Amino acid sequence: MNKKGLSGEELEELFPGLFGPFENPDDINKYWHQVTEKELEEYIEQAKKDSEDSDNSKEDKEIDKQDLKRWNEELDNLRIFVDDHTRCVERYKFDKKILQQIQDDWYEYNTSLWTGYNRIQQMKLDSSLTKGEGLKQIQSESRAEKIKREEIEKRIKDLLLK
């Protein structure tokens, strides 16, 4: 149940796709990185195809190459973070306080990825968010989420350096 008393099933019925491939909303906090990884892999494949399309202009091909580079970097960063998280859990499995911090960061990280997914879905439904003040707000929220994830990544890396 959420704050308004709706179950996950009721929310999913009201907002189809809200939980992505998950039936249980609690899985978002644990596994959303898998959805993001799959999406990034799909973006990379599409950017590869687009950059090789002979019908595209030179400018379009350059944009596709930049997209490809950006998606590859994001995917690499995500995979590094998942690996670092796994190593931290193993290293601190007997320290309940630090392990709880790692798990809280993990949930927050996945929730942040899910928030980004929902922001994109929101933009698809409301075109006013793709221009003007709406776009500025979306970009600001997106930057804030990215900073949050970078801070979490840093905390996990710092634990590994101890």
Image: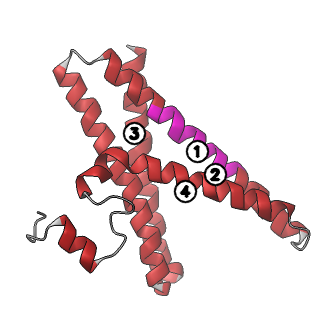
Q: Name the residue under label 4.
A: 39
Q: Residue at x 28, y 60 (%)?
A: 23
Left/right of residue 93 with respect to residue 85 in the rendered view: left
Numbered tag placed on residue 151 in the rendering:
3
Asked if marks 1 and 2 touch (Cβ < 8 Å), the reply is: yes
State the extent of the magenta-drawn residues as a range.
Answer: 69-82
The residues tagged by marks 2 and 4 sit, at their Cα atoms, a distance apart of 10 Å
Query: Of discs 2 and 4, which sits in the foreground?
Result: 4
* Spot occupied by residue 13 in the image (x, y as percentages of width and height): 25, 77
Relative to 96, say whether 63 is above or below: below
Mark 3 crowdedness (10 Å alpha carbons): few <14, some 14-19, many ≥20: some
* Spot occupied by residue 19 in the image (x, y as percentages of width and height): 33, 63
Mark 4 or mark 3, which is nearer the start of the sequence?
A: 4
Relative to 109, say whether 123 is above or below: below
Relative to 11, say whether 68 is above or below: above
Q: Name the residue under label 2.
A: 71
